[in-house]
Amino acid sequence: MRVNFGFLCDHFGHKDGKPSAEGIGLDAFCASKMPVRHPGFDAVISMRFGPEETGEKTVGLGVTDRDGTLITPARYEVINVKVSPGQTYQNKTLKITVAETEFLSFGDYQVVWLLEGLEVHNFPFRVLPENG
């Protein structure tokens, strides 16, 4: 498996059969005080699987603090990888919404993608003080 692309955004969906994202490149938000609960954003990843990787896969997403500790339970989805005869790979694009996450302090966090329990990609993410 290889990661084709990934990003954080305000909203991800499909329009006319094509991926569509609003607010792409999200990497921080500001808060006036702590703790703060963020209403939500979408994490998107596109992965390429080869013929030897067919079958069900568990993909997860978690948000960790600077020490790598999950600050909210990870969210999981199961995908089915099937490379069609004559093809050399299958791309899978997946969105998991990070909703109602509570951040206890200002600072650095990571949004971490997992495949079968192993980290395959991560995005740095910051919570900054307003006017700071």
Image: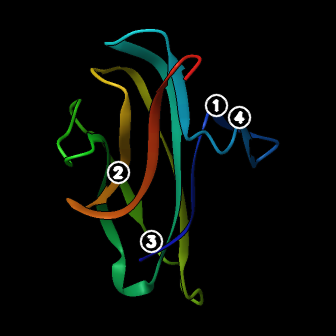
Q: CA distance from mark 2 to mark 1?
A: 18 Å
Q: CA distance from mark 3 to mark 2?
A: 25 Å
- Upstream in sequence: badge 1 or badge 4: 1
Q: Are marks 1 and 4 in contact (CB under 8 Å)?
A: yes
What residue did someone put label 3 on? Answer: 82
Frontmost of labels 1 and 4 is: 4
Where does residue 99 sit, x and y in percent of width and height?
42, 22
Picture disc at residue 130? none
Q: CA distance from mark 1 to mark 3?
A: 27 Å
What residue did someone put label 4 on? Answer: 23
Q: In the picture provided, is 48 more to the left or to the right than 80?
A: right
Q: CA distance from mark 3 to mark 4?
A: 31 Å
- Upstream in sequence: badge 3 or badge 4: 4
What residue did someone put label 1 on? Answer: 11
The quadrant the C terminus occupies is top right
- For the residue labelled by badge 2, is the local secondary structure a helix, a strand or a loop? strand
Locate residue 11: give its quadrant.
Answer: top right
Q: Nearer the viewer, residue 19 or 7?
A: 7
Which residue is painted at 54% across and 81% down in the image?
89
- At label 2, the amino acid type is Val
Frontmost of labels 1 and 3 is: 1
Q: Are marks 1 and 3 in contact (CB under 8 Å)?
A: no
Frontmost of labels 3 and 4 is: 4
- At label 4, the amino acid type is Gly
